[in-house]
Image (cartoon, rainbow, N blue to C red):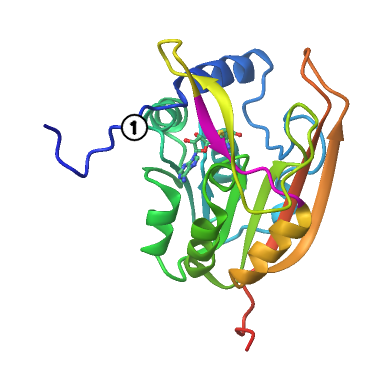
């Protein structure tokens, strides 16, 4: 029997990771940073401001392209590319293992962040952990891991892929996906509307400092999509 600490849940990201790496290579996407669904439009890394000497972590870094871009183009003290999927972590390691100041971590975001209080200047996610983890658990862990004045920036869906509106209550959806062997299954995704994100962030002790919405008419047979990019900061002084 495996030891109780061993993660035996299936890795839902193997197929996505393989497809994503192939598509990014074919489109010459290496060395780019975008927040939007189709990775083409809207603001890029400049939204993060200066990263000089900052401690940066991407939660749900996947194949690692965005984190590698930041490590190469900034003088951040270190960029951590964290992912809970062994297959994604391995892809990231194979592609970007030699990038200076890029550190790759295989871990679940909430558990990792709660163990590192006041450690990071920037936590960010591009359709990463913030989309796939209960925000009532993850957001307080993000706040705790940020230094005072530190920021959280994340991109998330502005509606479901079929056009259905975001949830206005805190509840996840089970969306269809397939395992590496082709077996159909589902994965939990949090598709929440902006007022709800604002309430959850405030409850976790974060102030919303900016919101961008990027709309795309659709590409490569994909549907029109809206991406919400939310920026929030941990105040220097705690609100009473
Ligand atoms: C849709 S992919 C996005 C990856 C990458 N940001 C990109 O744009 O290619 C979502 C990633 O988030 C990771 N993820 C989801 N929940 C996570 C959690 N709680 N902790 C760490 N990683 C998580 C998944 O393993 C997956 O690699």
**Residue closest to the eye, 51 or 133:** 133
Residue located 63% across and 16% down the image:
23
Which residue position is annotated with label 1?
A: 9
Answer left or right for 191 relative to 129.
right
Residue 72 covered by magenta stretch: no
- Find residue 104 and report its image quarter: top left
Q: Name the image quarter holding the C terminus.
A: bottom right
Report the span colored magenta. 186-193
On the image, the x and y values in percent for residue 216 come to 85, 30
- Residue 181 in percent (x, y) is at 40, 11
Is residue 118 or residue 77 the one in the foreground?
Answer: 118
Position of residue 177 relative to residue 36, above or below, is above
Identify the element where label 1 is drawn: loop
Q: Is residue 201 above or below residue 192?
A: below
Q: Residue at x 71, y 37 (%)?
A: 34
Residue at the image position 60 percent from the left and 84 percent from the top: 238
Could one spot residue 45 in this view of the protein? yes
């Amino acid at each position: 029997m495996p030891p109780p600490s061993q993660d035996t849940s299936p890795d839902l990201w193997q197929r996505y990771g393989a497809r994503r790496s192939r598509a990014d290579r074919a489109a010459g996407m290496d060395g780019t940073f975008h927040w939007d669904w189709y990775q083409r439009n809207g603001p890029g890394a400049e939204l993060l401001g200066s990263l000089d000497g900052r401690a940066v972590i991407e939660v749900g870094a996947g194949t690692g392209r965005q984190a590698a871009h930041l490590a190469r183009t900034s003088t951040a003290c270190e960029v951590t590319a964290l992912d809970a999927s062994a297959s994604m972590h391995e892809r990231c390691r194979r592609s970007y293992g030699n990038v200076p100041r890029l550190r790759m971590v295989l871990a679940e975001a909430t558990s990792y962040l709660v163990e590192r209080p006041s450690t990071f200047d920037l936590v960010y996610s591009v359709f990463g952990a913030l989309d796939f983890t209960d925000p009532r658990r993850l957001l307080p862990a993000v706040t705790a891991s940020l230094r005072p004045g530190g920021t959280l920036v994340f991109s998330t869906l502005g509606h479901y892929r079929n056009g259905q509106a975001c949830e206005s209550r805190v509840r996840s959806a089970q969306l269809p996906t397939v395992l590496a062997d082709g077996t159909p299954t589902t994965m939990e995704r949090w598709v929440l509307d902006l007022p709800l994100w604002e309430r959850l962030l405030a409850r976790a002790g974060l102030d919303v400092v900016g919101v961008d919405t990027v709309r795309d008419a659709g590409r490569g047979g994909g549907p029109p999509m809206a991406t919400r990019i939310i920026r929030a900061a941990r105040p220097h002084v705690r609100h009473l």
